[in-house]
Image: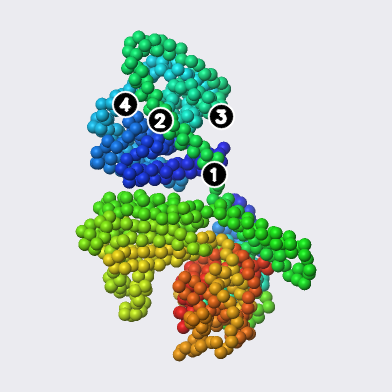
Amino acid sequence: MNMSNNFSEIMDEDFMVTEADDNVNKYLTFISAELTYGIPIENVVEIITNPSITPLPMVPTFVKGIINLRGQIVPIIDIREIMNKPVCEDTSILCVIILEIGSISIGILVDTVLQVINAPNKMSEPPSKNLDFISGMTNLSDGSIMFCLDCDALVSNK
Amino acid sequence: MNNGMDSMIDMYLFETNSLLEQLENIMLEAEKAKAFSSEDIDEIFRIMHTIKGSSAMMEFDSISKIAHRVEDLFFIFRQNNTTNTFSEPMRKELFDLILKTNDFMCTEVAKIEQNEPITDNIDNFITDINTFIEKLNSNEASPAESAVVSKTDDKHNVPQNEASLQSIPATTSPYIIKILFDDGCGMEHLRAFMVKSSVAEAIGNIFKFYPEDVETNAETCNYIIDNGFFIFLDDENLVDSTVAAIKNSLNIASFEVMLNPALENTQKKGNESDAPSKEKAGSSVATSKSKANKGNNGSAASHQQTKQSIISVNLSKLDKLMAIVGEIVITESMVTSSPDLKGLKLDNFTKSARQLRKLTDELQDIAMSMRMVPISGVFNKMNRIVRDMGQSLNKDVRLTIIGENTELDKTIVDSINDPLIHIVRNSMDHGIEARVEDRIAAGKDPQGEVILEAKHTGSDIIITISDDGAGVDTEKVMEKAKRNGILTKPESEYTKKEALSLLLAAGFSTNEAVTEYSGRGVGMDVVKQNIEKVGGIVSIDSELGEGTCITLKIPLTLAIVDGMEIAVGKSTFTMPITNIRQSFKCEREDVILDSLGNEIIERMGNYYSIIRLHSLYNIETEITDIEDGILVWVEASDKSYCLFVDSFIGEQQVVVKPLPTYLNSFNIKNSGVAGCTILGDGNISIILDALSLHTAFMNSL
């Protein structure tokens, strides 16, 4: 307990956030189709750019394919497709966040990765139940809105 | 310390499990033969003895106690040297008892494996065995036998009684070995027991020792510290091997071979009193002993031999080895087909590379063969199931096993265990007719038969489970499937084969009543799932009234396949070489169009459909003209077709990596993808599955 508090204090200095208590979780934020999303930091393994993606036949379009991550085969899914947004035209830089959810490794294709922030644990419920992969939303200090990605829903494949 | 304990437990579990398996096999064999041979009895005695000893050492008292009682039981048989005199119900009771005990020990050992506490309440078992022993003594024992038993009892008792009077018990054995342990080594009684066990292994259980309860009685510890541990031998010839065994034991401070001082007196007394009877008794004891000795020496020798030539290795180490060998295979091709070498003329390099290739091939073969185990372990378990179910369902069924020495990968052997149990249970429960009259009326042998067969065919292993029972009524199957709502097309369109494959669908069970053994409707689809998990296929054949045959086709190993790299557009695919019959170029005129516009080609008198991989998988490629690309004639089980691809890249051995589990939900197994592999340049190639590719093609039409 003590340890983790110390740890978060160090992190706070780095990220210029003043609050530090148990009700705060860390999120990695990223942008996809002009919306800001956040993922709980404990699910994030690493961020890679421009992996060579091998497409798979006969899978839904949001599954971009698989990559070879140092010998491990990781599937890549496109957040834009999942959120029913038009596919990104600019393919010069592919930004992939590798997540580990339970025992499943998965990569998500996003537009831009932003930063690690602290956000309160208790998030507002999204008003609409139609947002399948969103577990909550919250205001950030800069006034923008962050949608929290529901990692479990992401891998459960409805 | 903790590590040491863990590995000890591992060893214990391994040893005990294999002993229990052995015991079960012996019991089932013996039951078939309706009698124990003297080797069987010796073997069971030895097994129980080892289990007793090792369990006591690991402080699993309940197992040790039960093993002890069974050992006692077989001690009696050993003295009588036969169980043939048993009446039918008596024998049945004996077999049930021993098998029940075996089961109990198995579950206890499984509990130890799971780190659960083991059952202490073993009174029932002990009473059961005791009752049986009593019964044996009262009913069955002929006068001569009871005499033997009582005689052994005397032998047991006399030294104990006298021991309380003097330190060294009186004995009839001419040779006494006194063993002293290192000062302060601790647990002297268990060490003594270990010494005793190793002596028993060397010469057989034909000696006596004192104190006799070293194994169970911790107080003997003090006696051994003060006076030593004594072994009594009857025969001079045994002294040498005993001494050798003692020398090999740990923590022995000293030992000494003495002649029995009391012996002369006894001999005199014997001569004086009744010489002929003594001689008679002596000779009979001698013959029986020498017989036992012979058997024991034989088993001990073979035991030692297996000890020398086989070591047990942790499976995870083999997995690691296999993974590394896989990486070496990849790296080897990475090096030898490196783009940097293009255009260079490197004679020596090519020569060495070829040598390297040969060696990695060999290494891979050896690594693979290390994981190969005979299927007999799994097959033999079925004996038990057939026996138990035969009894409880009152069906007379024999199990015929063919090809039990067929070897396959350890992981596969493990994964087919449950499916086989399911299938054999189904055969017993639903397959074989419930009434013998029905079988006789159908002109069959009154005794039902279940045949388990395993055989190799190239890269696959085929396991068939067939019974000569009632067979599957496809009409009933259809009816049931309709009721359960698992039909996917009109009833009339189902062929017989399709109807039978409904049995494998989830939530299907033809038996109306749920029985103890089967009929919960989870059986066959679980079988299918498990087999598919290891890349296998399940198929059912059945003729109503004649029987059912279930075939499992499983790849020999999952790790490495010989593949042909195929290019389509920018993608690379791997087709297992075993599936490729031929590849050829074709002219536009050769292609025949059917009424729906599907392309067909004639090959050696037969017609095959052309599957264009680029259009099936929606891959952009410049090569769409049939004359530009290449046709690959592919064959998988009963499906054959020609695959149209851009070009061949080359033959390569590839290490199969399973696709991420996340993708399983997209039914990827039915789209022609078997897995993937990492090529020398780090790119991924998708390994095609010839059979499901055909299914995917059919579905896309």
Q: Report the disc number at residue B310.
A: 1
Q: Chain of mark 2?
A: B
What residue do we see at 78% from left, 66% from top? B346
From the viewer's perspective, is the residue at label 2 or at label 1 nearer? 2
Residue B54 appears at what percent x and percent y?
Answer: 46, 35
Distance (Cα) linking label 3 and label 2: 26 Å
State whether residue B94 is above or below residue B187. Answer: below
Q: Residue at x 59, y 79 (%)?
A: B584
Q: Report which quarter residue B477 is drawn in.
A: bottom left
Q: Name the residue carrying label 3.
A: B248
**Real-space Cα separation, disc 4 to disc 1, in angstroms:** 39 Å
- 2 and 1 marks in contact (CB < 8 Å): no
Dot 1: chain letter: B
Q: Residue at x 49, y 71 (%)?
A: B636
Lower sequence index among marks 2 and 1: 2
Judged from the image, the secondary structure of the residue bearing numbered disc 3 is: helix
Residue type for callout 4: Val
At label 3, the amino acid type is Asn
Q: From the image, tell me which residue sits under label 2.
A: B291
Tell me which label, 3 or 2, sits earlier in the chain.
3
- Marks 4 and 1 on same chain: yes
CA gap, disc 3 to disc 4? Answer: 34 Å
Q: Nearer the viewer, mark 3 or mark 2?
A: 2
The residue nearer to you, when weighing B15 against A87, is: B15
Which quadrant of the figure contains the N terminus of chain B? top right
Q: Are marks 4 and 2 on the same chain?
A: yes
| Mark 3 on the same chain as mark 1 | yes
Q: Which residue is mark 4?
A: B149
